[in-house]
């Protein structure tokens, strides 16, 4: 008798997937997090490209136009984050990720071929739309694809890929800058590398399934079940689909927050807390180092090629710190981790300011500054970075989450934009020490803010967190 399992290819495939859904889910995670890799590379590549781009025979950048080139991406990201989620709600995450891959690719090519500052700023803004969209859509997509007991680990893979992307940007900048540093258009070679993962994401979308939650929300329950059967253990798919549909029904009954609800004290307090967390995470100066680390090292005494190499250490410590932070974030209290990170970065900022004043002209200065930027990144990427996104995801109750998260992330990106825009101007105007002392003031304010306003959320349900805010 003919074996029906062997003769039926679709049945054979389904059983194979049921036996080992982890392989397919791993492939989904790898492909989708190429968006995080692009996020990291595109935000980090300017770190090494700007010194070459600023040359008179290239784009002839001033301090202000350097800031515009670097920060135009983050301004675009603010809008991409604002509208990306809505696009995914209408079109589905898979199709939206495909759009992002296309935008990543063509905006990258546009930056590479830019003949002047205006064109470069325009294409960097478009690239920012893709970055902002990826920052919202990919973590949500991963959360919806992941089993509940693996969700935290799989979602934070995107954060890891972002810092790996930044590390790769610093590494390629160092290699290309040292090998081809005398070539006029060396910065174009640095930028074009980002086209490769964009192309990989574009091609890889073919294997990505649609989010089962989105399919269920559109009434496509059989399609949702088929996807769940590929990524869940046998017997779990139908139960999870039942849970998803019940949750969607419950969500539809929740009255969403409106702007007038900001008049309610406990809601206003949560939104102010979310905005404060977003602003603090940027105004302590993280992206002065991620965007302008090479120039900081040049300013302290390194030559351009040595600064490019030294900046790779910043990329290495970022990756290590994120891995350590991911291992600690569910074991250490949120407030403790946040405050430890803020204290650490504030000490590093003050140390850079003091060293720049007291060691000016000393051959030790560039090495001290590099050591302190590495220390800064260890505390920021290991504590403040993970805690920012984890805390924002926890403090907003269901009816407040959409608007509250949107406002907080928008303020975060706009703060990022302001730091990126004005850092070269501040560096040129008041110098490295005064600029970092200014960042340290925001670090001190952040410590006070978190101490007074952030309640501990570790181990609490969203309902318990909401009750605690109402009880204050």
Image (tube, rainbow, N blue to C red):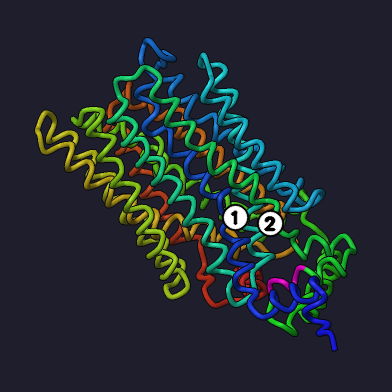
Does residue 68 appear in the picture of this structure? yes
Across the whole image, how many numbered discs are drawn on residues? 2
The location of residue 375, given as percent across then percent down, is 27, 52
Q: Residue furthest right?
A: 219
Quadrant of the rendered image containing residue 265: bottom right
Q: CA distance from mark 1 to mark 2?
A: 8 Å
The location of residue 336, given as percent across then percent down, is 40, 67
The location of residue 125, given as percent across then percent down, is 59, 29
**Any mark on residue 31, and which?**
1
Q: Quadrant of the C terminus?
A: bottom right
Quadrant of the rendered image containing residue 7: bottom right
Q: Quadrant of the N terminus?
A: bottom right
Tag 2 residue: 207
Q: Residues within 10 Å of mark 1 (few under 14, many from 20)?
A: many
- In the depicted structure, whether residue 89 falls above or below residue 427: below
Q: Is 191 inside the magenta-drawn segment? A: no
Q: Earlier in the sequence, mark 1 or mark 2?
A: 1
Q: Secondary structure at mark 2?
A: helix
Magenta residue span:
227-231
The structure residue drawn at horizontal position 26% and vertical position 28%, both measured from the top left corner, is 304
The structure residue drawn at horizontal position 65% and vertical position 62%, both measured from the top left corner, is 396
- In the depicted structure, whether residue 203 falls above or below residue 457: above
57 relative position to 204: left or right: left
């Amino acid at each position: 008798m003919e074996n029906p399992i062997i003769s039926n290819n679709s049945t054979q495939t389904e059983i194979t997937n049921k036996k080992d859904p982890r392989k397919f889910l791993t492939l989904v995670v790898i492909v989708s997090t190429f968006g995080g890799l692009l996020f990291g590379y595109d935000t980090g590549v300017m770190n090494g490209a700007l010194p070459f781009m600023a040359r008179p025979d290239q784009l002839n950048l001033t301090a202000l136009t350097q800031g515009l080139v670097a920060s135009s991406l983050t301004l675009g990201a603010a809008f991409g984050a604002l509208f990306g989620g809505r696009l995914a709600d209408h079109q589905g995450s898979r199709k939206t990720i495909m759009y992002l891959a296309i935008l990543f690719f063509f905006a990258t090519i546009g930056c590479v071929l830019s003949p002047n500052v205006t064109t470069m700023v325009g294409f960097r803004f478009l690239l920012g739309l893709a970055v902002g969209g990826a920052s919202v859509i990919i973590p949500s997509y991963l959360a919806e694809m992941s089993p509940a007991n693996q969700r935290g680990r799989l979602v934070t893979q995107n954060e890891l890929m972002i810092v790996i992307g930044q590390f790769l940007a610093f590494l390629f900048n160092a290699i290309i800058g040292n090998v081809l540093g005398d070539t006029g258009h060396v910065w174009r070679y640095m930028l074009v590398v980002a086209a490769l993962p964009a192309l990989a994401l574009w091609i890889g979308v073919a294997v990505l399934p649609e989010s089962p939650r989105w399919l269920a929300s559109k009434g496509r329950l059989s399609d949702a079940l088929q996807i769940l059967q590929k990524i869940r253990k046998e017997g779990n798919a139908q139960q999870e689909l039942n849970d998803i549909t019940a949750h969607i029904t419950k969500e539809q009954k929740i009255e969403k927050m409106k702007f007038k609800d900001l008049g309610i004290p406990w809601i206003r307090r949560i939104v102010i807390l979310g905005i404060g967390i977003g602003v603090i995470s940027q105004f302590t100066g993280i992206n002065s180092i991620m965007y302008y680390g090479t120039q900081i090292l040049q300013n302290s005494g390194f030559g351009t090629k040595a600064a490019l190499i030294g900046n790779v250490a910043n990329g290495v410590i970022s990756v290590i710190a994120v891995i350590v932070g991911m291992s600690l974030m569910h074991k250490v209290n949120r407030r403790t981790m946040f405050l430890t990170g803020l204290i650490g970065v504030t000490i590093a900022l003050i140390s850079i300011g003091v060293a720049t004043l007291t060691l000016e002209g000393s051959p030790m200065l560039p090495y001290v500054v590099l050591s302190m930027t590495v220390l800064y990144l260890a505390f920021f990427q290991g504590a403040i970075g993970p805690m920012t996104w984890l805390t924002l995801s926890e403090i907003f109750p269901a009816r407040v989450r959409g608007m509250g998260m949107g406002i907080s992330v928008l303020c975060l990106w706009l703060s990022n934009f302001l730091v990126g825009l004005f850092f070269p101007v501040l560096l040129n105007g008041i110098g490295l020490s005064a600029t970092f002392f200014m960042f340290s003031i925001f670090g001190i304010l952040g410590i006070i803010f978190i101490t007074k306003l952030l309640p501990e959320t570790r181990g609490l349900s969203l309902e318990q967190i909401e009750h605690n805010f109402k009880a204050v």
